[in-house]
Image (cartoon, grey):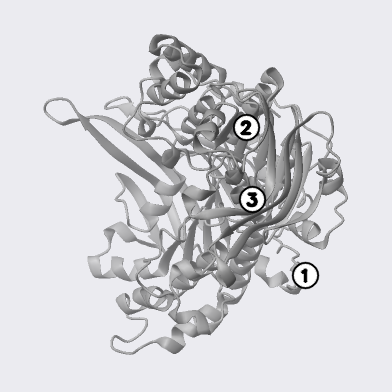
Amino acid sequence: MQDAEKTPDDMLLRVKNLTVQFGSGPMAVKAADDLNYVLKRNKTLAIVGESGSGKSVSSLAVLGLIKHIGGQIASGEILFKSDVLGREVDLCTLDEESLRRIRGNEIAMIFQEPMTSLNPVFTIGSQIVETLVLHQGISQRAARQKAKEALELVRLPNAGRLIDNYPHQLSGGMRQRAMIAMALSCQPKILIADEPTTALDVTIQAQVLSIIRDLQRDMGTSVIFISHDMGVVSEMADDVLVMKASKRVEIGAAKDVLGAPKEDYTRALLAAVPRIGSMTGTTKPKLFDIPGEASEGDTPEAADFDASEPIIELDKLTTRYDIRGGLLNRVTHRVHAAEEVSFKIYPGETLALVGESGSGKSTVGKTIQQLVDPVSGAVRFRGDDIFSMPKTERTSFRRQTQYVFQDPYGSLNPRKTVGESILEPAFVHNVVAPGSNGRDYVCDLLEKVGLPAAHVDRYPHEFSGGQRQRVCIARALACKPSLVIADEAVSALDVSVQAQVVNLLMKLQAEEGLAYLFITHDMAVVERVSHRVAVMYLGQIVEIGSRQQIFENPQHPYTRRLLAAVPVLDPGNRPERKPLEGEIPSATRRVGDEPKILQLEEIADGHLVARGTEGFEGMQLA
């Protein structure tokens, strides 16, 4: 890829020596430092790097939004060929009125979290209509028709009905597609996609990526794709810009940067990427090989576990949520979140529970943790049914099971130091005697999870995302549990930080004999860390077996669908995927309309698959 000083004829956007900073004087922090790149017409430039590298800030500068978040452009130019203004302009020097004419019209953005980007008090349709009326000057009626067409373009089922829905009435994947429809409604020349698929299931992610590619092909849109998912970047990007600590590290064609990286940092990023198929032929989990850390060969005992007696056993566990409605506020519908779920977890074992959003994974974890009461079935801890225990014994069991949540910042109290947050559950469960300061105990836990003991008095906002997740792991370990439920614990982390946290969990498992219920939709991470895998669909397990059985010999069409949708880091080779239409069916049913319980059949030692594939035929993508 040519540098910014040698602008190609098909150049659309040119960033020259851009420096963005927050604050002023000697305390100023540079979020983007002397950045240069070129975006070509009808091409995709991927910007990759860890959190804090300056990816999002540099793109917000293109939209002229930096001043609205407390920053400023200290130097540099952002040159853009604008049809609206009829000339090439420097976006850094444009007045707000001119920027408004370009923003959303010629340059649009898809943000990472659609629920916070969409206005919750307006319907999806009215928000798209507002954009069209503002930028194209058409009537409300014409704008509504165009909004409907935009929703159909992004393959939202029943767009005529959904146009009048509010954001909270749509699933995560549907909201993200509504955001894409809004961004593309004015047919912009440049689309900036900031982590548009990070929190989505692999199948919904595949749909969103397919939509962006198709729209780029049909409308000739150029795309700036910001991501830390190197598999997604490999499938989407023509060119790749690697950033670290606000600076450009490497830039070039995707096949060169991803296939033969020149810089050590790029190689380290790629080494941390979990790859589907990399564990073929192996039976035990492996640590990620991170420079500076012990390799996987140093802790082979991490893969051993005692299969003689389960630490926890689920026997036909059923959990449902009532939905009330009507004048009399009666129960009219139920969410069948978990239906007759059965499995065992052994000491020192990692069982991965995978499936799309709404499949019931988190409900199972919350039921084990006694955050939700089941309708029927049993959860046995070392042979004793916890829901038949007296209250005092149930509290004791709760100490034995601890939770690590997806969002570490949201699960830590911002007004408490991390030391106080870690120590609180230890006090509650009498692991540390009430009245003692417990400081030494907390310091030991911090060091165990790889954080300096000196950080005990810091607050959550003073840590990075990966460090905060380590704090949450330390808090879970404070009660000396036997089972840790990790609910999407690494899904939102950068690949390098994710690899560090996964290695930490596996090392702690080897040292402490912990059992893990690893709830996630990231199939590549599951292949790396799990001993066994259970696949859930609409509240039921459709396949369960060893990691090797599930990944190397998947039998159920839904399992194959999940695996087929995983982006693969293979630069220069973009797989042709069959389009995945529509949404996952709902687990909500009218009272009296009970779901059919799937019967599992053992096809090999420990490998169980649901009988029959009615309703799954369209999922068979492999």
Instruction: Give the mark, 2 or 3, whose residue is nearer the N terminus.
Output: 3
Residue drawn 54% across the image and 34% down it:
99
Res. 557 visible in picture: no
> Three-letter amino acid code at disc 3?
Lys
Counting from the top left corner in percent of width and height, residue 560 is at: 65, 34
Q: For mark 1, give the secondary structure.
A: helix
Question: What residue sits right under mark 1 in the picture?
Answer: 297
Whether pointer 1 and pointer 3 mark residues with C-beta atoms closer than 8 Å, the reply is: no
Please name the residue that numbered disc 2 is placed on: 191
Q: Where in the figure is residue 348, as x and y percent of width and height?
A: 57, 67
Q: Position of residue 175 (x, y in %)?
A: 46, 32
**Which is closer to the viewer, label 1 or label 3?**
3
| Residue depicted at 65% across the width and 31% down the height | 190
User: Is the residue marked by circle 3 packed among few (<14), some (14-19), or many (20+) residues within 10 Å?
Assistant: many
Q: Nearer the viewer, mark 2 or mark 1?
A: 2
- Quarter of the picture containing the C terminus is top right
Residue kind at label 1, given as amino acid type: Gly
Residue matched to label 3:
55
* Position in image of residue 441 (x %, y %): 45, 85
Q: Residues under labels 2 and 3: Cα distance?
A: 15 Å
User: Residue at 55% across / 20% down in the picture?
Assistant: 155
Residue type for callout 2: Leu
Quadrant (top left/top right/bottom left/bottom right) for the N terminus: top right
In primary-sequence order, the first of circles 2 and 1 is 2
- Quadrant assignment, res 333: top left
Q: Is residue 318 at least partly visible in the picture?
A: yes
